[in-house]
Image (cartoon, rainbow, N blue to C red):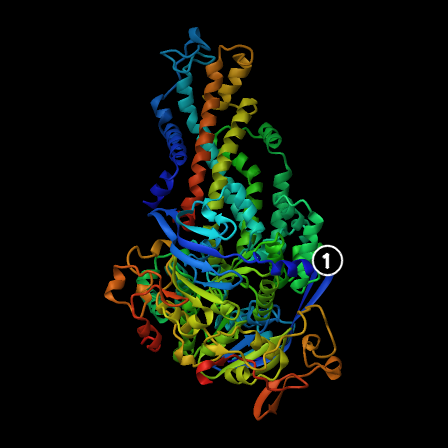
Amino acid sequence: MIEARGIKRTFHSHGAFTGAHVVQALRGVDFTLPPGGAVSFIGESGCGKTTLGRILAGLETFDEGELLVDGADVGSLGKRGRDEVFRSIQMVHQDPYSVLNPTRTIAATLGDPLKMVARRRGEKDKGAQQARARELLELVGLQPDGVLQKFPHQLSGGQRQRVVIARALTVDPKVLIADEAVSMIDVSMRLGILSLLRDLRKRLGISLVFITHDVATARYLGEGGELHVIYRGEVIERGPVETVIQSPVHPYTQCLLSAVPVLKGLEEPGPDRLLPKDMLDANLETPGCLFEPRCPFATEKCRAEHPVLGTETVAGVEVQHACFHPEVRNVAAVDLETV
Amino acid sequence: MRTWRVLTRKPGRVVGLAILVVFTLLAIFGPFLHSGQLAVDPDDVYAGPSARHLLGTDFAGSDVLQEIITGARYVLETAALSALFTAVIGTGVGLLAGYHRGPTDSALMRLTDFVLTIPGLPLLIVLSTIWSFGRPLEMALALGVTGWGGVARAVRSQTLSLRERGFLEAARGLGLSSRHVIVKELLPNLAPFVAMNMLLAVIAFIAAEVALFFLGVVPFSSSNWGVMLNQAVFSGGAMDSTSALSYLLSPLVCILLITVGIVLFLDAVDELFNPRLRERS
Amino acid sequence: MTDIAARADAPTAAAEVAVRDLTVCFPTDKGELAAVSHANLTLAAGRITGLVGESGSGKSTLALSLLGAVPTPGRVTGGEVSIAGVGDVTKLTKAKLRRLRGGHIGYVFQASQNSLNPLKTVGKQLLDLGRAHDVENLPDLVKRARELCELMGMDGARVLDSYQHQLSGGMRQRVGIVFALVLNAKVLVLDEPTTALDMLSQAAVLRIIARVHREIGLTTLIVTHDMGVVSELADRLAVMYGGRIVEDGPAEEVLGSPSHPYTKALINATARVTGEIGRARALPGRPPDLMSIPAEGCVFRERCAFAMEVCASVEPELARWRDERRRACHAEVETVTTEGVAAS
């Protein structure tokens, strides 16, 4: 169970020709991940979602805010405490090939953490470790005999990703952070990985933090999923996945959903589809709403004041958003069969 | 089996391997073939090649071919040992520096820079005045301790770039120890690099030791290729006449052959170590 | 804008490209294997065609063969690629091929946003391109490039003076398109034009491609693994698997009522924002690569829900079954189109 409050992270860099450069990657993100839950973060590239994922996995520090994992405040723990906490939060990357050691077989890659876990528990039975490796491979939908003695480059992208998930499972994690976990996998195999993640939630009670730019994939993670929309380090809308997709109220969410390609012949475009006015300027800081320069519905108020995430009922639907002029617009594609 | 396939894929590699095998065998068994003192024949000094002396004779009338064969051991032994020392010291330093970074890295790199800036040969010559390192192990130590700078720098930069690869971060995230990461994850990925460096170092060290003997800086104890060159040039007048030509050329040609052998074989090393390259795409 | 618009009115503006029985082979340890096998595809003049296929399907090889640029050691072992106004690409001399590339066909490579030289400005690289093609009037070339930039919503002068790192991913992709078209190409081929771009940038680039296609009057081929990328733009859709074209036809019809089991399965396996979640199904197995393409019979049979005995021994031919629609399958059309999602 993860609780994040007001997470802020700022990057300072100093270019040789451009001088000091400050990027506010996260401007105060809150969210709660219940045990067995699934929270998805969507946004454009550079919106901070990857940084958030890395902070949650313990690979990155944060400047302000609190991160509580099962009630323990990560900031107050020493190195050992932190290492232990973050071991129960494992990351699944976009590129499965780069996170597998190319010179080691799958058996060795799984064997190392299993051996370490066994040693910690005082178990000596090597046979048990090998059996567990096979068990985990089957759990992720792979044939142990077909995979154990192979090297990563001999497997397909989908198989590699499954191995990565199996490896993450060797340390009995409670949370999996999937950062664009299916983006580099062939379309025909993506759903397999998504179903696997859904099954892990159901069978093992593992919670998921799913980071993606492809909204549609967030729908396949199982029941009770939440969708959080991030814009330039801020969550500007959130709610149950289907609610946000069918009844989005923030113009940015609506732009994102409008950008999803419509499969003509199967779907028809949402009637209210819209476009952002301008391109993203990552350097622009304003006292008002960060999306205002690109928002087709911006007003003076939006330029002057900064909207805060809050709950409101709009058009009969209870939503959480950060907008001064929320309005439900039907932008998502519509399945022709329901028309 | 796969090793054989990798080796035979290009004929050059087999040639390289064959040359190295021949010289290794010479190094191991050479001295047994001609045990004891070399036959001396004062009437037949600096003779050219003939049926009795295939490569001619030296300043004392001893058979050059015999000397080449018995000398092989010293040359190869010291070169191999030196390469081993530089590999071990250099890899150790480079790995630790690249993996830990920060103050460890700075300290180790200052040390490496120190070793790199000192000119090798002059240092060895100076060193020889206080320590006569004629024996193989001593020679190897002297060469190894002064020559690991380049390997350290190269291994460090390889380590730094491997660090960026996700699998190291993943291993730490799983809770695997630093020792595991360095030995089981990093080293196998560095292995081809280090192996190639070692082979190239052997070439450099052969040249270095032969140079030291040629310059007469190190006392010689027996037949030795560098000594042969020294004698050929300074006593046999090889630079002025053709009489000691085969005496001069024999060690040179051997050195050349070994270099060619290593270079040809090197081609196979990368593929041997890298499982990905072993499969034909 | 006048130059470009004027060209659109010219009767020979767009060109038809016909790929007939094309086979491209690569040497491997197991002998020469076909990455593309007896492919038949027509790019109708003035239309946008989408070529959809996963990794290993041979789509990029097919696209490169339009330029005669199949990477060695691969080679064309059969068939032809004829381009209206040029002839058979597979038979052209080296000199003619060079003129063809850029001059007649513009190719935008995969991840072209990474193919700009980081040490030179865009403008300098444009001039390099011009000189490589023996363009005499370089100022004219620059003018055309600026016009294309405006067409794509970019400030031409600024872009030409920029270095690669000063432009965003979406802008670099557009620069790639500018380079492909600046020498008055009539045919535009884009290989995965939106990989590594997020949704908003992708939508913007696709809109621009549609606009450029319309304004200049091109014949466009978009090669991708993502059906969504071509679903809105393409007039015609062709689906590739294991080096073969398994289905093609008007995009709307192929998506709405796919007639080949692979097309159908691929659509069902695509994550969508709408529609029943329960209907979606991943395909079992994995797409074949060059070495694992079955030598006999239908290449898709091992993952096919409708496989029959004949599929193991006889390779189905790509045949017309309705005007404008073709499929390569032994199963009856009705069986494939009416049956619901295959029982898992």
Residue B135 is left or right of residue A134, and the answer is right
The chain ID associated with circle 1 is C
The residue at 53%/81% (across/down) is: A245
Relative vertical location of residue A189 with respect to residue A72 in this rendering, above or below: above
Relative vertical location of residue C324 with respect to residue C123 in this rendering, above or below: below
Q: Position of residue B278 (x, y in %)?
A: 39, 47
Relative vertical location of residue C328 with respect to residue B231 in this rendering, above or below: below
Q: Position of residue C306 (x, y in %)?
A: 30, 70
Farthest residue toward the top? B43
| Res A6 seen here | no
Q: Position of residue B52 (x, y in %)?
A: 36, 12
Relative vertical location of residue C81 with respect to residue C318 in this rendering, above or below: above
Farthest residue toward the bottom? A316
Q: Amino acid at mark 1?
A: Ala
* Front in this rendered view, residue C112 or A90: C112
Q: Position of residue B192 (x, y in %)?
A: 46, 45
Farthest residue toward the left? C309
The residue at 29%/66% (across/down) is: C330
Q: Residues within 10 Å of mark 1 (few under 14, many from 20)?
A: some
* Front in this rendered view, residue A1 or A166: A166
Residue C96 is left or right of residue A120, and the answer is right
Farthest residue toward the front? C11
* Front in this rendered view, residue B24 or C224: C224
Give the SS element for disc 1: helix
Residue C259 is left or right of residue A74, and the answer is left
Q: Which residue is mark 1?
A: C157
